[in-house]
Amino acid sequence: MSTRPGAPPPDFIRQIIAADLKAGKHGGRVITRFPPEPNGYLHIGHAKSICLNFGVAREFGGRCHLRFDDTNPTKEEQEYVDAIMEDVRWLGFDWGEHLYYASDYFEQCYDYAVHLIKTGRAYVCSLTPEEIREYRGTLTAPGRESPYRNRSVAENLDLFTRMRAGEFPEGAHVLRAKIDMASPNLNLRDPVLYRILHAEHHRTGGRWRLYPMYDYAHPISDALEDITHSLCTLEFEDHRPLYDWTLDYTPAPCHPQQIEFARLNLTYTVMSKRRLLKLVNEGHVAGWDDPRMPTLSGMRRRGYPPAAIRAFCDTIGIGRRENLVELALLEHCVREELNRTAPRLMGVLNPLKVVLLNYPEGQVEELEAVNNPEDPAAGTRRVPFSRVLYLERDDFLEDPPKKFFRLAPGREVRLRYAYFIRCVDVVKDQAGQIVELHCTYDPATKGGHAPDGRKVQATLHWVSAGHALTAQVRLYDRLLTLADPAAMEEGRDFGDYLNPDSLVTLTDCRVEPSLAGAAPGFAFQFERLGYFCVDLKDSRPDALVINRTVTLKDPWAKIQKARME
RNA sequence: UGGGGGAUCGUCCAACGGCAGGACUGCGGACUUUGGAUCCGCCUAUGGAGGUUCGAAUCCUCCUCCCCCAGCCA
């Protein structure tokens, strides 16, 4: 059990497991599993499950398996298997030698099915899919028994064997459990155990012509791996009787315990694979790893540290009620982690040229800058300073409103780690646009301190025009305009909910020269702007591409926003 | 109208018959060579009605609202 100071109190699942352990259940062991279907990329919702399953195993001295739930060859691909393994590792978890596939158990599942047939608990049904649906009844009306329900064991065995041999086309027959067509739980109305599929499986190739359903393969897979606690999401609660039925009536070696918890919902975020796939397929994003996607690969590219995602999962806790967690909490965790670890740099997103009239032409100074005020061990670096600089365009206003503390005509501000400067002239083009500022600097304030003790209201970031690197910076923001994704109306176009400003690409940014040669994925802070990282895919040494991970908290932006409204 | 779940600050999670607490958000303030960080303060909650009890978020009864289930998907 987690005893870290500040760790959240144990959730109901950890309480159950602790009690089971104390009672000697499951032989005193704890074995969990994370069972993704390789039909899409992992997202932040999966991270919750990964952190739970691997976390619980670690805390109780057990282990956690990675098992691919690959029982539907029509949807699953090796590409997803590879991506999922990469993402789980990246998140910081290790399944050791315990990598499994449900398809590893197909033979065992088949044998168990034969056992069910022989004991009169399963039968081959030859109804069409439409007929099966009709026979199932409705939520309020009981179903009717299939006319094939009472086939002899011998006939069932013969048919099932020939299904395996590939003698029948898809849809001709299924194997069904013989349970209760009048059960108020629809999952118990003779659920389908096996269907015929003439599809190439990414691992078993063409060996199988029939494939087990999730409800049947999952409990058997769990039992075969000696899983003690099978944790899944709430919508499987109605399936638990079937999970237990399967283990009760097959020769499964043990009986794991299924426990359900509530899945994660995040504001401004779609989480279903169907909708994520739609975003990708309709070109609303550049791919599964687009930095706006809630996928782990997207977050990795966005610059979210895995430790931040783990901290987030710890913070949200585990419960059984529907929830909608605010995106702000995730961003808080990202900032908290990056504040501790990310080196500080200076970069100007929208450059405004500034000439220091009294600074000697041709002179260059190397000024010392702190790399991370939160981490003295990060040391310092040298940043070149010269007569011509770039400042952030947003940091100057000709006619400053109240509470705007930055540069304005006649006003003095500090340049971070450099000098106090005062704006003496504003140069405009014929259209009236500000093209350049003329300032003076005070040589006595080198390093940013005034010997006479006078104060300035603002400290601005800057780069030396002659030394700066040009970079492309991609400003990312939430993908959706709608806070509650559940409120999205089905059938309405995705476009109605997309934030048109979720990606703003800036191509003429100027960044300090120490960024030259930065490795893809390098995460840092541009002082006063936010946390950024070098793009994993598109950045090249001679053409930097930088992603904004998350902004810094910005009171001025908030004041502006409030004024707009 | 069948069955299965669930309702605690705006949000997420605690409190397991004994002072409703933490985090995020929001709002104020201190400090500041990042309007960052840090620190301090404030706001706001037990769905409703009964009952049991010295004492109820917690136990009982009834009601209301929300979510899930009619794939040969997982």
Image (tube, coloured by chain):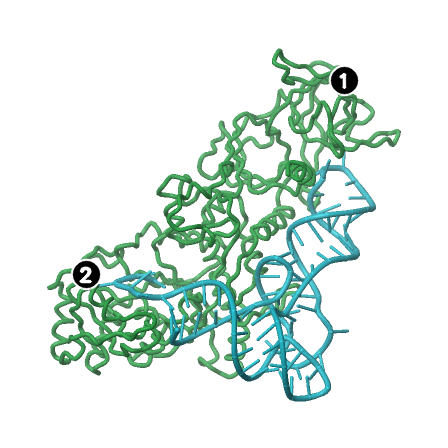
Chain colours: A green, B cyan
Name the element at disc 1.
strand
Chain of the residue where label 1 is placed in the rendered structure: A
Tell me the tag on residue A424.
Answer: 1
- Lower sequence index among marks 1 and 2: 2
Please report, as a chain letter, where disc 2 is located: A
Secondary structure, mark 2, is: loop
Relative side of A149 to B67, left or right: left
Q: Which residue type carries mark 2?
A: Arg
Question: Would you say residue A527 is visible in this rendering?
Answer: no
Relative to A73, does residue A62 appear above or below in the rendering?
below
Residue A231 at x, y percent in the picture: 44, 68
Identity of the residue drawn at 31% across and 60% down: A70
Q: Amino acid at mark 1?
A: Val
Q: Which mark is residue A207?
A: 2
**Which mark is on residue A199?**
none
Residue A12 picture quarter = bottom right
How crowded is the residue under tag 2: few (<14 C-alpha within 10 Å), some, or many (20+)? some
> Quick one: label 1, few (<14), some, or many (20+) residues within 10 Å?
some
Whether discs 1 and 2 lie on one chain: the answer is yes
